[in-house]
Image (cartoon, coloured by chain):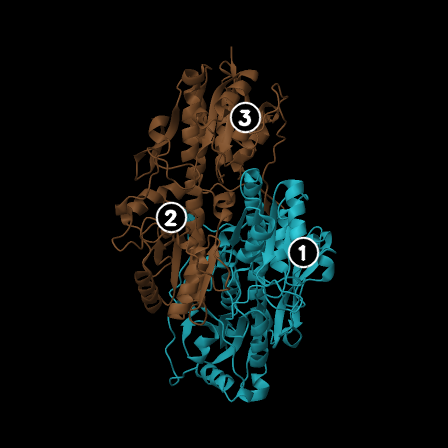
Chain colours: A cyan, B brown
Amino acid sequence: MPRNAFYAQSGGVTAVINASAAGVIETARKHRKHIGKVYAGRNGILGALTEDLIDTSKEPAASIRALVHTPGGAFGSARYKLKGVEKGGHEYERLVEVFKAHDIGYFFYNGGNDSADTCLKVSQISATLGYPITAVHVPKTVDNDLPITDTCPGFGSVAKYVATSMREAGLDVESMAKTSTKVFILEVMGRHAGWITAATGLAQSRPAEAPHILLFPEIAWNEEAFLARVQEAVRQYGYCAIGASEGLQDKDGKFLSESGLKDAFGHAQLGGVAPMLANLVQSKLKLKQHWAVADYLQRAARHIASKTDLEQSYAVGKAAVELAVKGMNSVMPTIVRTSSKPYRWKIGVAKLADVANVEKKMPRDFITADGLHITPKCRAYLAPLIAGEAYPPFENGLPNYVRLKNAAVKKKTGEYKP
Amino acid sequence: MPRNAFYAQSGGVTAVINASAAGVIETARKHRKHIGKVYAGRNGILGALTEDLIDTSKEPAASIRALVHTPGGAFGSARYKLKGVEKGGHEYERLVEVFKAHDIGYFFYNGGNDSADTCLKVSQISATLGYPITAVHVPKTVDNDLPITDTCPGFGSVAKYVATSMREAGLDVESMAKTSTKVFILEVMGRHAGWITAATGLAQSRPAEAPHILLFPEIAWNEEAFLARVQEAVRQYGYCAIGASEGLQDKDGKFLSESGLKDAFGHAQLGGVAPMLANLVQSKLKLKQHWAVADYLQRAARHIASKTDLEQSYAVGKAAVELAVKGMNSVMPTIVRTSSKPYRWKIGVAKLADVANVEKKMPRDFITADGLHITPKCRAYLAPLIAGEAYPPFENGLPNYVRLKNAAVKKKTGEYKP
């Protein structure tokens, strides 16, 4: 007898996480022998806890297909870390109650590091709580910091966005520098890992071009070296363009932009490195500056998504279902690079125990000796990830993104307050 | 006998100002009977003053064509206002000296309000300084604040960028709002006129969608009304997305970004309205916020240019040359809207005297009575300006923008220090 599946989006959404959702749902629809309905959690795992399930079978095939070109999280995502039994909470028991009520035998969790840990714990429910379930993690994070997989779905599109934006803004600044702005700073995401910052460097095809400096979270902030390099670039090229990570830290690991606020996982909420650096350039070097903070624009920019990233995002969703119906529990499909030139990849499989809570930082040899740019080795790794365009359809000058019906499944359990 | 032409880019560059350059150069090449060579000013008008001229005839046709898809100012632009004779300077005399040395009989100036005034003064050189010249202004400004013309080349592409970005970021925030960011602020350009802020509003196709609030420079800042509306949107829709003009001012015309306030991190403000508003929301409403400052990204974003804007940018360059060879001096080609539905336009002509230093602000009836959004009338005006896509060619995942040779013309006059 087929059992139903639960799918949820977790953590920060991306331009292509819905492509993974489409991969899961379309593939599940082809495996009716194993999978009945796919229920999506409204607002991620909260949807499971509160029994707020979305019946994706009510969505026509065209709407599910349109997810491939729609950014954001179509069912709602959540920053919510499940409290384990050891914490006095009983959230895993509650999950089992809801899963049992809706005969859910498959759990697909679409997220990053923290989510992989949650998925791992769900995959152990058969053993820990005696309820049979197959849990597969669907990788997603713009931070590109999941281990084992060659890259993380969502990253390639942010990479393409930041590299394109830097190339464009660089041309702008270069053409005005004689009489106007001489220093431009683009702040990008990546709290602990400099992958997005590194991708900004792809914009540069020769030393005179933007960006001239990259500031990574992996490299301790050095004000003197930074200012010297800015001045040098302005002298040599007439201007200086900088890609800076929001997670820039000093040698003691203190974020330059620490706001004092923390998110649900206890991570510091960042933002505002660019104005800080601009202020420094203005006061110390007396150079006219401008700065941009891309923030959500970068991870939502479906209009400039990477075709490679899009295909991989769909593929991991599809593979997750295929692994699950084969009975593989506690795993995550990965991207395996089989060739760099020409770029070729295939889907592999990792054990969740090897993935959960492991953070893949930039290898030191991806960063130049002076810590201020990327090496050819890094370029060779990054370049194929942004390859190819996959424009969404436009209507009246704007991308035509789908909005699902998101019909609720009738509740069967009592009320629950998470 | 044909005479040579001078072309210069002035003020802030755009995603499509080079399309106007292509329009000028390609059209001049078709009028060999009247126009010899087109010399471009390196770094705008400074190139004329310092006799740093670029010989565009050295560029192959394919490179000039590639300007159509290349953002920034291919010859360099300048923020530089010519000092008139009355100011004790002699810059107009110097222009005549250089023009005479290179037999320049046509002056094409590609800029906004200030530039129109400069072009007007050059157009009067025949009368004031006895040197025969025909001067035509080529309109360009993302601020959309030139009078007479229906729209300003460069604006439609920024409009498309900000509306697309807001739609995308809106989907992102909406999907995370349950447990994460509830208020998102996108700061856009437009120091004195709210046209770009208004365009951000095009992202919204129904009240639940982003943006829920627009903050115009034309409407005096009202903290209480703003906070009340934010709270209302969060209550009704779960989140609130805001498009804010960098030029937001209080009732005394004082810019909020120069208010002496510090951002969430204690840094003095650097033109950052978004972080200031975010700080306010955080402290007064205790709502989690995120903010983006698009800065140069918006006006350089050739990858998401409006096809309509691109065509108009080329057309005004072409028309400028056609007007000049007809002997029309002291004019500017304009965009005339001949029909709104379906949108149709043609090229018209305005006298420079009617254009120079006149600033077109948003009509009050383009803004809702409460001052916080756009009206259907505004939508009807804006919508056609962002219509159509015109993607640049991509290579290895990035836009393939052209870099000209920019060969210098041999100098014939003595040194000159501006």
Dot 2: chain letter: B
Which type of secondary structure does the marked residue at label 2 adopt? helix
Three-letter amino acid code of the residue under disc 1: Glu
Image coordinates for residue A41, horizontal then vertical, percent: 45, 73
From the image, tell me which residue sits under label 2: B199
Image coordinates for residue A382, horizontal then vertical, percent: 66, 55
Which type of secondary structure does the marked residue at label 1 adopt? helix
Image side of residue B374 versus residue A214, left or right: left
Residue at the spot x=56%, y=84% of the render? A125
State the CA–CA distance, disc 2 to disc 3. Answer: 36 Å
Image side of residue A40 versus residue B401, left or right: left
Image coordinates for residue A400, horizontal then vertical, percent: 42, 52
Dot 3: chain letter: B
Give neighbour class at mark 2: few <14, some 14-19, many 20+ (Cα, 10 Å). many
- Answer yes or no: is residue B391 visible: yes
Image-quadrant location for residue B171: bottom left
Dot 1: chain letter: A
On whether disc 2 and disc 1 are found on a single subunit, the reply is no
Three-letter amino acid code of the residue under disc 2: Ala
State the CA–CA distance, disc 1 to disc 3. Answer: 39 Å
Residue at the spot x=54%, y=75% of the render? A266
